[in-house]
Image (cartoon, rainbow, N blue to C red):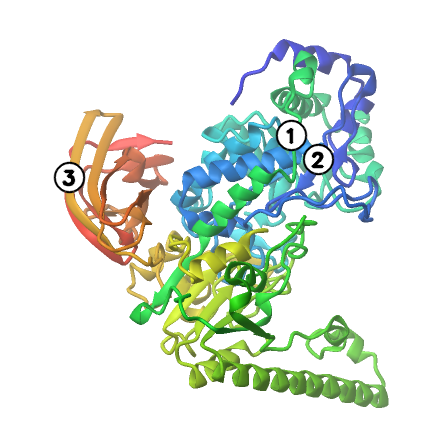
Amino acid sequence: MMNVDETKIEELVSELTLEEKIAMIHGEGIFQTAGVKRLGIPPLKMSDGPMGVRKEFALKDWTNVGTTDDQVSYLPSNSALAATWNKDIAYKTGQVLGAEARGRGKDVILAPGINIKRSPLCGRNFEYMSEDPKLIEELVVPLIQGIQENDVAACVKHFAANNQETKRLWVDTYMDERTLREIYFPGFYAAIHQGESFTLMGAYNLLYGEHCSQSKFLLTKVLREEWEYDGAVISDWGAVHDTKQAALSGLDIEMSVGPDFDNYYMAKPLYNAVMNGEIEEAYIDTKIRNILRTMYRIKMLGDDRENRNTGTYNDMKHREIILEGARESIILLKNEEDRLPIKKKGLKSIAVIGQNAERVHSDGGGSAEIKALYEISPLLGLKMKLGGNVDIKYAKGYYVPTKEEKEHNWQQHSIEREKELTEEEAKELEKKKQLVLEEINRQGELLLKEAVELAKESDEVIIIGGLDHEYDVEGQDRTDMELPYYQDRLIEEILKVNPKAVVVIMAGSPVEMNRWSDKAKAIVWCWYAGMEGGTALAEVLLGDMNPCGKLPETFPKYLNDSPAHKIGEFGDLNSITYKEGVFVGYRYYDTYDIETEFCFGHGLSYTTFEYQDLNVSVKEINKNDLKVMVEVIIKNTGAMDGAEVVQVYVADKEASIERPIHELKGFSKVFIKAGEEKKVVIILNKNAFGFYDVTSKCFKAEAGEFELRIGSSSRDIRFTKSIELKNSYLYI
């Protein structure tokens, strides 16, 4: 971590009163702590920000300030970012987020979110990157570095094992130590040791019986002692439940959702506990040091304040970077008979069907919501690109219930309330429910009929459906993987009358496609890709941009194929056990040969790539140093410029314990002009070959045979090469 002058920190600590220290370690506003004016210590101002800096709230409550000066750039979600598999895009995206946060006067941006995508149902999956720790490691580091260049602290979250929203404040999570160390820790370790994230956020859930945001195991033993982290640790909002546990843990700042700031657990209750001799003031001093150290690192204190980055938001250059990221995030899942790109020559009419063609997504999702300066929808993007000579007609296709209908919806109504009703009231309620259902069905049938008729008479048909932030949302998990609003039926009916219709799914989590995926000739996946998402999608569909995104997670055929649901536990339980262990995502599907809808790392292109001339060299320099160099020539054998992601998977052929069939350990995205070729070099070290050994309490790469698998996805392997390690290696 960036070094600071510790003597200055000690001077400030010695001058602070206990009251002032206490004020600095808990919220004094919804998104800020108290400063100490007499010592020149300003308040620490924070903002949510996975997809942009959140709108401005009043200091003491969640009232929207309501002005227009908090409109900002809308960035692609972390899922979209991960789909680019591009470290440079991650870095530039971080620069944009950091600049906008600093431009809005924020000191800490509560991002990035890197929790493992264990289940397709997690409501916050769209905020997270991947099911794979290696992909997370490689992207989170440049993202954090880009953020912090702007003298604003990244706050990597949520530490740790926060993988469902159901009962998120009270669910107790259990897994074996190897799983925790191999799957759920690596992203956080890379974030603080390579990315040097200045702050870190604790999670809501419990792990091994302790709330994560006040856990001595997580925040003291692992984070402070083992990982030697000296930045500031911030609780998730409302994640602290006990004064003594919070005080004695590695937590530094307690934040919450209510305005009763003086009665937060680390406010008056902690002050009283110190005064009564129950808790030593030394624990408070340690927290203050971590906070002051963070403030020095982002130039909030001392002589550096005059040189602090001012930041900027809504810059034109930011939009260019956002567009670049959106372009590279779009994934071509299927393209039979070269159905895409759409041929513009001679094109007269296009039917665009589905409400995600025009729906705005930036203002939803929970803490990820922002007030976007603008958001280009797919419908707008297509119209902007094609101009006035093509007749673009739009049909909603499916019915999304209104807010009022949702409030009367039989699924939403409180069971407890129903128990209180008289027999007559219950009958009346049932009648209302039935009327709502009938109206929803009636509206849906009308929109379906309109869409089918439009599809019959148009040259091209593009269906744009998927999820929205009623489903991809903080605080709530999905109940299944089905498309909502009867969209499966819509897609089936459209494909009957126009088999060449292109299907675009916009969502932050996998959906079941088995009812129609074999019938559709072209399927495109689009995440919540930011303010220029519609522009990027139009460019891909029309062939102005060659798709180059790859899946950062497996798309299972059915929910029960997911190991979290087939083997482990998920959902409405007080205690969850990750019985699948390290077999998360493709580690499970590929090891046990489970058929998937689309595999990890998959993504097609409008061109083709040939892998040639694999060369692998192994250098065991000493018992602590290993270098394996993978070199391969990639040739663009098609007629269009494009990009390929070369992926290296490692298989341990002689492991002393059960390991996945292979694991991603390196990748490189390379852009190649049509007909040209480039050499790709990927270097692996000892970390690429090890597993966590619970006996020695460290990672171990055993001597023996390994197989390197080089390809375009976890199931599209172009080359294999066996190597032998003569030495064993131990590492943290």
Residue at the spot 57% in from the left edge and 74% down from the top edge: 393
Q: Quadrant of residue 590?
A: bottom left
- Picture layout, residue 9 above or below residue 683: above
Foreground of the two, 54 or 661: 54
Element under label 3? strand
Q: Which of marks 2 and 1 is nearer the N terminus?
A: 2
- Picture layout, residue 264 above or below residue 291: below
The residues tagged by marks 2 and 3 sit, at their Cα atoms, a distance apart of 50 Å
Please state which amino acid type lies under the numbered disc 2. Answer: Arg
Residue at the spot 60% in from the left edge and 11% down from the top edge: 5
Please state which amino acid type lies under the numbered disc 1. Answer: Gly
Q: Name the residue under label 2.
A: 104
Relative horizontal placement of residue 720, taking residue 585 as reference (left or right): left
Q: Name the residue under label 1.
A: 311
Q: Which of marks 2 and 3 is nearer the N terminus?
A: 2
Q: Mark 3 points at which residue?
A: 615
